[in-house]
Image: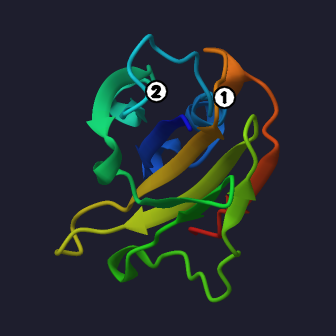
Amino acid sequence: MEITVQWVRTSWTKKSRGGQAAACRNAAPVGFLLPRAPSSTVSFIHMAEADGFEPREFTKGLQEVDVSLREADGRLRVHARVEPLFGLPPRPHRPPAVRLLPGQWVRWQLNYRFTGMTAMREWSYWLDTFNIAYGPIERNVFLSEPTVTVDECGPVR
């Protein structure tokens, strides 16, 4: 069965935490029209503060995505992975995996906060959105409402 993955990463610094810059960041889409690429690749879209949150699209391999995908009994088991290094904000109670039937899709969101090795470097932030569909889909599927939404975003101060 086909598995389609779109990974959208939005990255910013403290400069975009308020005012007009934050409004621009918050207006960034979390889903895009799919390219005409084989389903064995991942459509990766990066929107960065440094580029005015303009989408830049790349292709990645499925093994590069921090999501566990497993097919069993006619369903797709989806669970986003969080490495201990990327533990901020704290995630003491992670949600269970989502099991999709053919034709369904999930939008899973996680956010992160980072700092450099020295206290001189600004905080930086990421929002990762994983749009994952199971079975044949249309190119515009991730522009619609997902079957399941998992929001693991926490406070990043």
* Snapshot quadrant of residue 2: top right
Instruction: In the rendered structure, find residue 27 and report the number of the disc placed on it.
Output: 1
Give the Cα distance between marks 2 and 1.
9 Å
Q: Residue 63 versus residue 2: which sits nearer the camera?
A: 2
User: Disc 1 marks which amino acid?
Assistant: Ala
At a point 53% along the width and 18% down the height, the residue shown is 34
Rendering coords of residue 28 (x, y %):
60, 29
Q: Residue furthest top?
A: 36
Q: Secondary structure at mark 2?
A: loop
Residue that badge 2 annotates: 53
Rendering coords of residue 10 (x, y %):
47, 40
Rendering coords of residue 13 (x, y %):
41, 49
At a point 57% along the width and 35% down the height, the residue shown is 25
At a point 69% along the width and 52% down the height, the residue shown is 74
In the rendered view, would you say 82 is above or below 84? above
At a point 54% along the width and 75% down the height, the residue shown is 89
Quadrant containing the C terminus is bottom right
Horizontal side of residue 123 vs 5, given as left or right: left
- The answer to whether the residue labelled 2 contacts the one labelled 1, judged by CB atoms less than 8 Å apart, is yes
Quadrant containing the N terminus is top right
**Pointer 2 local density, CA inside 10 Å: few below 14, some 14–19, many at least 20:** many
